[in-house]
Amino acid sequence: MNKNAKYIFVILSIVGAFVLGRMIFELPFPPDAAVPRVNTATENSLIVNITQLREVANLVTYEYTGQAMINFKDHKRLDAYGFSFDLPFTDRQYVAVGQAKVAAGIDANKMDVKEVQGKKVTIAIPKATIRYKECLPDTWEVLVDKRSIRKLSRDEIHKLENDALVDFTNTAMEQGILDKAEEKAKETIEKMLKEAGATEVSFILLP
C-alpha cells in the first residue's frame, strides 16, 4: 500500500467512526428504558416564590379599623366607723373616642412546603395572629372631661387609651379577624404559586 492510499484509508476510518457514533447516540431509547422528564423550570419557579414569601416576616392580610372609646367615671369614697359615703367634689368622668386599627396575618417565616408533585403543591401555614394594633394619637376627641378637684394625670389617660385599645382588639377578634386573615393569606399564597405555574394548591394549618 502506497503512501497516498494509507492517507485515504486513515481519513475514511475517521469519517466512518464519526458517522457510526452519530448513529449510535442518536438512536431513541426503547419504550421500557424511557426516563420521565421533570419540569424543573416550573418546580424551581415554585420554590423561588415560596422563598420570597418566607422572606416576608409579617404578612399582614386583614385589617380591622374603627372607633375606640373611653368611658371612665369614678369618685372618692370615705369608709370610717362603719359608714361609707362619697366625698363631695371628687367625681371624675372622662369620655373620649379615637380611631384604632388592628391587623392580623400569618408569619410567613413559619411556612413549610409539605409536598410538591409536578405542579401540585401542599403548603403548611401557621395560624393567624394579631400582628399589630394601635390607636392613632392625633384622632382622640374628648367628649366629656369632668375632673373637679381630682385631676386625671397624663399617665392615667394613657392607661385609659391602652385599655380602650384592648377592648377594640377583643371586638375585632369577636368579629372573626383571625379567620378572615387566614383565608386572605391562603388566597394570596395560592395566587402567587399559580402565577408561578402551579395548577393546584392545598393547605395544612399548623397547630
Image: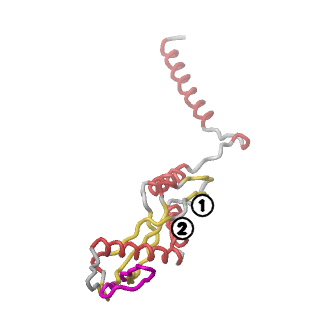
Which secondary structure, mark 1?
strand
Instruction: Name the residue rendered at 60%, 38% in the picture.
Output: 26
Magenta range is 75-93
Name the residue that disc number 1 marks. Answer: 205
- Residue 176 rendering spot, x and y as whole percentages: 54, 75
Residue located 50% across and 59% down the image: 196
State the residue position of label 2. 182
Q: Position of residue 51 (x, y in %)?
A: 47, 53
Residue 116 or 14: which is nearer the viewer?
116
Please name the residue shown 27% across and 73% down the image: 154
Crowding at mark 1 (Cα within 10 Å: few <14, some 14-19, many 20+): few
Q: Residues within 10 Å of mark 2 (few under 14, many from 20)?
A: many
Q: Quadrant of the N terminus?
A: top right
Residue 140 higher or lower than 44, as above or below? below
Relative depth, front residue between 176 and 78: 78
Location of residue 65 by image quarter: bottom left
Residue 77 part of the magenta segment = yes
Marks 2,1: beta carbons within 8 A? yes
Q: Amino acid at mark 1?
A: Leu
User: Does residue 189 appear to the left or right of 78 in the view shown?
Assistant: right
Q: Residue at x 29, y 75 (%)?
A: 137
Amino acid type for the residue under numbered disc 2: Glu
